[in-house]
C-alpha cells in the first residue's frame, strides 16, 4: 500500500514551520512553503489548506507573531516570525521528534 508523500507531514507541520522561521527569520506563507519544499528536495509539500490554519493557530497560541508587509514582487502579504514562546515550543517539538524517530529506528533495527 503506497501512501501519498504528504501523509508523512501529519503531526510535523508545527515543527517545520517553527524551525523554518527560527532559521530564516520573518517570512510569508508562500516563502515558508517554498523553503520546506526546496530543503526537502521536493519530498515535503505544505498545502495551503493545512499551512494557513496552522499559522493562524500558532499565532493565536503566541508561538508566532504576524504583520502585514509587501513581498519581493510588490504584493501585500502577512509575514510571520517566531516568538520566545515559539522558540520554547520548537525545542519541545524537536525533543519529541528525536524521541519518536529514535523509537522507530530501534524497531526497524530489531532482529
Image: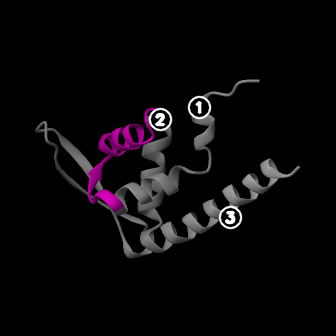
Q: Are marks 2 and 1 in contact (CB under 8 Å)?
A: yes
User: Residue placed at 34% from the left, 38% from the top?
Assistant: 34
Q: Which residue is at the front of the view, 73 or 20?
A: 20
Q: Where does label 1 land, which residue? A: 5
User: Residue placed at 47% from the left, 52% from the top?
Assistant: 16
Residue 45, numbered label: 2
Tag nearer the camera, 1 or 3: 3
Q: Quadrant of the N terminus?
A: top right
Q: How many marks?
A: 3
Dot 1 surroundings within 10 Å: few (below 14), some, or many (20 or more)? few
Q: Position of residue 25 (x, y in %)?
A: 28, 60
- Label 3: state its secondary structure: helix
Q: Which residue is at the front of the view, 29 or 102?
A: 102
Q: Are marks 2 and 3 in contact (CB under 8 Å)?
A: no
Q: Which residue is at the front of the view, 8 or 30?
A: 8
Of pointers 1 and 3, the one earlier in the residue sequence: 1
Q: Where does label 3 land, which residue? A: 99
Mark 2–mark 3 distance (CA, rounded to whole Å): 23 Å
Left or right: 65, with 60 as reference point? left
- What segment carries the magenta color? 23-45
User: Residue 43 lies in magenta, yes or no?
Assistant: yes
Q: Residue furthest right?
A: 111
Of pointers 2 and 1, the one earlier in the residue sequence: 1
User: Residue 32 lies in magenta, yes or no?
Assistant: yes
User: Residue placed at 43% from the left, 69% from the top?
Assistant: 86
- Label 1: state its secondary structure: helix
Task: Give the answer, above or below, for where 45 lies relative to 15.
Answer: above
Mark 1–mark 3 distance (CA, rounded to whole Å): 22 Å
Left or right: 95, with 108 as reference point? left
- Label 2: state its secondary structure: loop
Task: Give the answer, above or below, for where 18 lies relative to 12.
Answer: below
Q: Position of residue 48 (x, y in %)?
A: 43, 36
Amino acid at each position: 500500500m503506497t501512501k501519498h508523500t504528504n501523509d508523512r507531514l501529519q503531526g510535523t507541520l508545527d515543527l517545520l514551520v517553527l524551525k523554518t522561521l527560527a532559521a530564516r527569520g520573518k517570512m510569508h506563507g508562500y516563502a515558508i512553503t517554498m523553503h520546506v519544499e526546496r530543503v526537502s528536495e521536493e519530498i515535503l509539500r505544505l498545502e495551503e489548506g493545512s499551512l494557513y490554519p496552522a499559522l493562524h493557530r500558532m499565532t493565536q497560541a503566541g508561538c508566532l507573531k504576524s504583520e502585514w508587509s509587501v513581498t519581493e514582487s510588490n504584493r501585500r502579504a502577512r509575514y510571520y516570525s517566531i516568538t520566545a514562546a515559539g522558540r520554547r515550543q520548537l525545542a519541545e517539538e524537536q525533543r519529541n521528534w528525536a524521541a519518536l524517530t529514535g523509537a522507530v529506528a530501534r524497531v526497524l533495527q530489531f532482529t
